[in-house]
Structure formats: C-alpha cells, structure tokens
C-alpha cells in the first residue's frame, strides 16, 4: 500500500488536530510507506540495544549521509532513539552508548 499525502494535507491535519508542526505527520507517513501501517502501532515493550548496535546505527547515519528519520526507518527503530544515541555519542563518545545500570534515570 502506497500512502501519498500532499503538502497541503499535512497543514490541514496539523490545524485540524492542533499540532504545532507537520513534522509528526510527515514522519508517520514515511514510516508507514517504508514499513507498513502496523509499524505505527505503539509498542509497549522496552527493548534494550547493545552498544555495538547503537554504534552501527550512528555509523550508518554518518556513512550514508541520510537523515535521522531515514536511519530510524532503515533500522526499524524510533527516530527519537536515533537522536538520543547521536546526542550521547557526540557528548560522551562510545562510553555514552553503554547500557545504563538499572535505576539510572539520567
């Protein structure tokens, strides 16, 4: 199924639902196009990722010079997760990608 929404429809939906920007709608459409509508269903589990996996996501993002959204779609993870890992990597290096000890709510 191919989902096509015109730029003006983004703005209509944004206004209709009182969203501050069209970004979430844009992201949802592209995620659904790449991975299917079921991908948009909120997952209730908390998945732990290895330091190596996080590093491979960051390296893929840099190597292919693609957006964080496209990186997230490729790996089928949340764009906010990609943002978090890139931020932690840029500020703390590889150590920032280690699993946090239980109870560490940084």
Image (cartoon, rainbow, N blue to C red):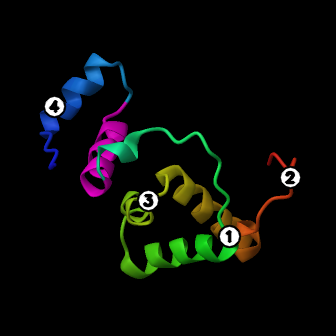
The reply to whether callout 1 and callout 4 are in contact (CB within 8 Å) is no
Sequence order check, earlier mark of 1 and 3:
1
Residue 24, compared with residue 95, is above or below; it is above
Quick check: is 32 in the magenta stretch?
Answer: yes
10 Å crowding of disc 1: few (<14), some (14-19), many (20+): few
Residue 98, compared with residue 38, is above or below; it is below
Label 2 or label 4, whichever lies nearer to me, is 2
Q: Which residue is mark 4?
A: 9
Sequence order check, earlier mark of 2 and 1:
1
Q: Which residue is mark 2?
A: 102
Residue placed farthest to the bottom in the image?
63
Q: Give the x, y percent position of residue 25.
A: 31, 37
Q: Which residue is mark 3?
A: 76
In the image, the segment drawn in magenta is 21-35
Judge left or right: residue 9 versus residue 77.
left
**Magenta stretch secondary structure, dominant:** helix
Q: Which residue is mark 1?
A: 50
Indicate the secondary structure of the residue bearing disc 2. Answer: loop
Sequence order check, earlier mark of 1 and 4:
4
10 Å crowding of disc 2: few (<14), some (14-19), many (20+): few
Sequence order check, earlier mark of 3 and 4:
4
Hey, which quadrant is residue 81 in on the image? Answer: bottom right
Task: Work out how far the residue at label 3 is from the one at label 2, CA to CA, in angstroms.
Answer: 25 Å
Task: Work out how far the residue at label 1 is from the one at label 3, CA to CA, in angstroms.
Answer: 15 Å
Task: Work out how far the residue at label 1 is from the one at label 4, CA to CA, in angstroms.
Answer: 39 Å
Label 3 or label 4, whichever lies nearer to me, is 3
Q: Nearer the viewer, residue 59 or 47?
A: 47
Q: Residue at x 62, y 45 (%)?
A: 45
């Amino acid at each position: 199924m191919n989902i096509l929404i015109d730029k003006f429809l983004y703005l209509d939906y944004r206004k209709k639902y009182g969203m501050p920007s069209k970004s979430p709608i844009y992201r949802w459409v592209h995620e659904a196009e790449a991975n299917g509508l079921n991908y948009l269903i909120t997952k209730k589990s908390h998945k732990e990722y290895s330091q190596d996996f996080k590093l491979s996501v960051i390296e893929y993002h840099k190597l292919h010079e693609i957006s964080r959204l496209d990186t997230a779609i490729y790996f089928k993870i949340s764009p906010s997760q990609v943002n978090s890992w890139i931020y932690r990597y840029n500020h703390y290096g590889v150590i920032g990608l280690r699993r946090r000890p239980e109870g560490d709510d940084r």
